[in-house]
Amino acid sequence: MPADLTVDDATLVLGVETSCDETAAALVMGGNDVVSSVVSTQVDLHADFGGVVPEIASRAHLDVLNPVIARSIVEAGVDESRIDAIACTVGPGLIGALLVGVSAAKSLALAWDLPFVGVNHMEAHLYAASLEDPTLEFPLVVLLVSGGHTMLIEMLDHGRYRLLGQTIDDAAGEAFDKVARYLDLGYPGGPAIDEAALLGDPEAIRFPRAMMNDGYDFSFSGLKTAVVNYVRKHPDVSSADVAASFQAAVVDVLVTKARRAAQATGATSIVLGGGVAANSLLREEILGGCGVDGIQGFLPSRSMCTDNAAMIAAAGWHRLRADGPTPLDVGATPNLRLDFID
Ligand code: KG4
Ligand code: ZN
């Protein structure tokens, strides 16, 4: 890496993301100016299987990663020599999928003699919101809800996070996907339930709200079982009513706990992240709740909530500034954790 690298508003970082079923590359300047962002989704490849198949994911990343990186550079309209650093997700995620991105990013760093920065995918999700609203002020409460994780995090400053709560079993998106599969609504399940729920009555069935008054942790596997048991007992029930009532139960718990966390920590805003943040009811209820509580509710666009490489480049810029480059002998870590303060 060049010895004279300073990390400032002009530093251009190439971000690479291959941790799950999205192959993505982006160029971000100064940690918050998205110059280009390209995402190639594999959702169609996995649809027949009702979930992500790790081996198929790795092969698809191999096929498209180089063209995706090339496109991110072309769309940015810059010469590759303008890039100052390469950031890549090193975990958590699927090992084979991660390795494709990590190997490519390290090779580019070597070939172009640039610093490499290993990024924690979860930390990157925390940075996604500030890419769309750089005026967001700490402390923030971030509700991170995706197919793989459900976390309530207090973001006190760059690099200073407190884990308030997380799921003790299924992730919220996983519950959407499993219930949708059971109801035969299609894959991915979240958008299918969201759509079906529009035609249903959210009060038709009172599904359980697990751990509602029990700290900030979540549990969704009992809710999924409650749905299965209900449908078995009432085979003629309308799927739309089940979808709407299930969705209402999930959203009720998520919003209640996020609002409680914001009040307890004195947060200025609640920010959503992860694929489930695209859910219409969740978005509506968070905004409504924040209005009542007198704080800001920030809802990033769907493309910023789901996996993308702009958030990797942004988190990489902050990491590079705080810690410098990551040694090239770093590997991919499927169960990489975020460092939380107590
Ligand atoms: O963040 P993401 O794209 O991938 C990871 O899991 O990392 O999240 C995908 C999850 C899936 O479980 C999907 O069903 C869910 O987000 N999802 C939704 C909606 N759109 C996507 N869940 C509820 N409502 C939606 N509109
Ligand atoms: Zn993610």
Image (spheres, rainbow, N blue to C red):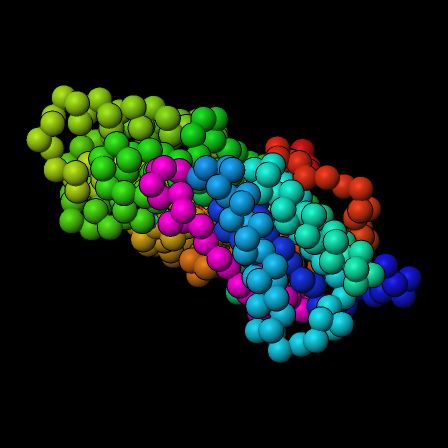
Count of number-bearing discs: 0
At x 67%, y 76%, the residue is 78
Part of the protein shown in magenta: 25-51
| Residue 242 in view (yes/no) | yes
For the N terminus, give its image quadrant.
bottom right
Residue 197 position within the rendered picture, expressed as x and y whole percent measured from the top left: 22, 46
Residue sitting nearer the eye, 43 or 256: 43
- 169 shown above or below 32: above
Eyeballing the image, is 189 above or below 38?
above
Report the residue that reaches farthest toward the left: 236
Whether 203 is among the magenta residues is no
Judge by depth and name the residue closer to the eye, 241 or 291: 241
Name the residue furthest right.
Answer: 3
In the image, is 243 to the left or to the right of 219? left
Residue pushed farthest bottom? 77
Residue sitting at 28 percent across and 35 percent down? 181
The x and y percentages for residue 124 are 60, 51
Quadrant position of the C terminus in the picture: top right
